Amino acid sequence: MPIDPVCKMLVNIGKEKASYKGRGYFFCSSECKKKFMETPEAFAK
C-alpha cells in the first residue's frame, strides 16, 4: 500500500492521486492532495 506523502498514512490506491516529476502519489483525502499540490517539493522524495 502506498503512503500519503503529507500525513504519512497508508492509503488505498484511489481517486486522490497526483503526479510530480514523473512519479505518482496517492493521498488519503483531498485536503492532503491540496497541501501537496501547493508545495510538492516539500513532500516529494
Image (spheres, helix red, strand yellow):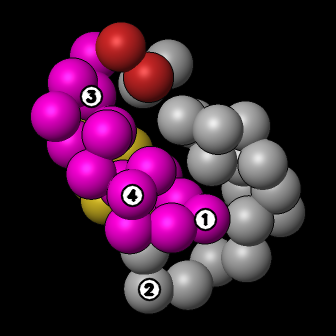
SS label for mark 2? loop
Q: Residues within 10 Å of mark 1 (few under 14, many from 20)?
A: many
Which amino acid type is shown beneath numbered disc 2?
A: Lys
**Which of the two labelled residues, at mark 4 and mark 2, occupies the earlier sequence position?**
2
Disc 1 to disc 2: CB gap under 8 Å: no
**Which of the two labelled residues, at mark 1 and mark 2, occupies the earlier sequence position?**
2
| Label of residue 18 in the image | none
Which amino acid type is shown beneath numbered disc 4?
A: Glu
The vertical placement of 7 against 13, above or below, is: above
Q: Residues within 10 Å of mark 2 (few under 14, many from 20)?
A: few
Disc 4 to disc 2: CB gap under 8 Å: no
| Label of residue 15 in the image | 2
Q: Is residue 38 left or right of residue 32?
A: left
Q: Residues within 10 Å of mark 3 (few under 14, many from 20)?
A: some
Q: Which callout, 3 or 4, points to the residue nearer the camera?
A: 4
Which amino acid type is shown beneath numbered disc 3?
A: Pro
Residue at horizontal 21 percent and vertical 24 percent from the top: 39
Q: CA distance from mark 3 to mark 1?
A: 16 Å
Instruction: Report if residue 21 is visible in the image.
Output: no
Which amino acid type is shown beneath numbered disc 1?
A: Cys
Where is residue 2 shown, x and y percent of the image? 73, 56
Where is residue 27 shown, x and y percent of the image? 53, 60
| Label of residue 31 in the image | 4
Residue at horizontal 27 percent and vertical 28 percent from the top: 40
Q: Is residue 24 left or right of residue 6?
A: left
SS label for mark 4? helix
Instruction: Report if residue 27 is visible in the image.
Output: yes
Q: CA distance from mark 4 to mark 2?
A: 13 Å
| Residue range of the region highlighted in magenta in the rendering | 24-41
